[in-house]
Image: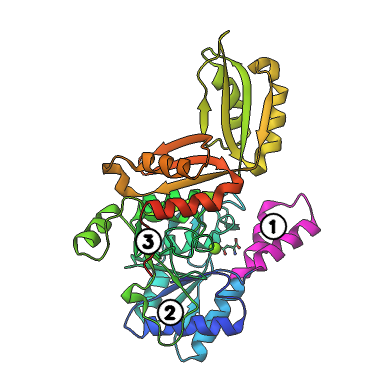
Amino acid sequence: MKFGGTSMAGTERIRRVAGIVRAQASRGDEVAVVVSAMAGETDRLVGFCREANALHDPAEYDVVVSSGEQVTSGLLALTLQSLGCKARSWLGWQVPVKTIEAHSKARIETIDAPGMLAGMESGEIAIVPGFQGISPEGRVTTLGRGGSDTSAVAVAAAVGADRCDIYTDVDGVYTTDPRIVARARKLKAVTYEEMLELASVGAKVLQTRSVGLAMKSGVRIQVLSSFIGEDAAPADELPGTLIVSEEEMNELVEKGEMERQLVTGIAHDKNEAKIILTRVPDKPGAVADIFTPLADASINVDMIIQNVGRDKGETDVTFTVPQSDLARAQALLEDRRSEIGFNRIITDSQIAKISVVGVGMKSHAGVASTMFRSLSDRGINIQAISTSEIKVSVMIDEDETELAVRVLHTAYGLDAAD
Ligand code: ASP
Ligand code: MG
């Protein structure tokens, strides 16, 4: 079981969490719980580091920012004890959660937890602070922001859990953002691949890395709400959204528990910006000259289109980068203007990427054409397109984001019935 920062914000909420944990344990399960820091706490701790030393040593930064989870794990253990449960905390170094050295962005390597497992077998609930681990040098590390989802999946894999229930402030994964489409539906299940695509294009329910890890280690995840009443359906009845392998998804469909859909969800992302380089020489090596310096600067390029060549052996190249990297990308390219040999650089951050995602499209034609037709019927212009086996993305004017999402949600038959 994993509880996020909103669920852990204050002793009152921790008491509610303890109630949910106790209910699960009283069904006869051995339980490990991974917790986040109280909402806002990690930001506060990061702020202290900046104030103390703008050029902070990442190892000491980790000592400071990992402390939020130490507090909540101890508090949850105390609260469970007050409810009559056996419980104890296992800090990252005690489990141990072994990570690589990279402070502030470490990756978990192994979790070998015989002590914790023995405790669980004897009926003791194990509480593990998320986000933290221990480096080969024996120092505290952290996993990068949002990292306790990844801690939870890694712990679930290590103890061979039946399921990793991620309790959060939403009650599942939806067909699209319910703030845009009132008729968005909660999905009963999505595959790892779909979740990865949805997460990377703006549906921020779980840290993307945690989904990748779950896929690799075969951990079944359920996303569900921690804001539930006494009479709520227990987690074993799967009230949230399951994130599972394609095989398990197929079984669910065969058993009639899921409908087979062409498109599972629609995501939008307003955090990209567009760059157009005009009159780039249309010759071998030209695009390499553009994208190599961007890659060297760790700027992630997403959509790329090279227009048909103009006369005089020239072409325009359009691509997108994260908005936060736009200024850096622009400066970098300006510096190499003569090397690359372009004429003008045009940028636009008023764009949005809309993606339709679904494993169903692997075996069906017509998903992309439905998208293009529906958007054009509403006068929405498509500026770029990219696809993968289970995703079609288009770039449009940012002002048309909400309209596009609504139109597509209806076009693919995703609207909930009344
Ligand atoms: N507390 C950490 C953060 O805010 C880790 C997490 O909650 O996932 O990034
Ligand atoms: Mg989180």
What segment carries the magenta color? Answer: 40-69
What residue sits 32% from the left and 83% below the top?
Answer: 27
Q: Nearer the viewer, mark 3 or mark 1?
A: 3
Q: Is mark 3 within 8 Å of ligand 1?
A: no
Give the mark nearest the N terminus, 3 or 1. 1
Identify the main secondary structure in magenta. helix
How many C-alpha atoms fall within 10 Å of the one at disc 1: few (<14), some, or many (≥20)?
some
Quadrant the N terminus occupies: bottom left
| Nearest to the observer: residue 285 or residue 132 | 285
Location of mark 1 (residue): 60
Disc 3 vs disc 2: Cβ atoms closer than 8 Å?
Answer: no
Please name the amino acid that badge 1 sits on.
Glu
Residue 157: assigned label: 3
Separation of residues labelled 1 and 2 (CA atoms): 30 Å
Residue type, mark 2 in image: Ile
- Mark 2 highlights which residue? 125
Give residue 360's position: percent from left, percent from top.
30, 48
- The residue lying at 34 percent from left, 72 percent from top is 238
Query: Does the stretch in magenta take in 43?
Result: yes
Residue 166, quarter of the rendered image: bottom left
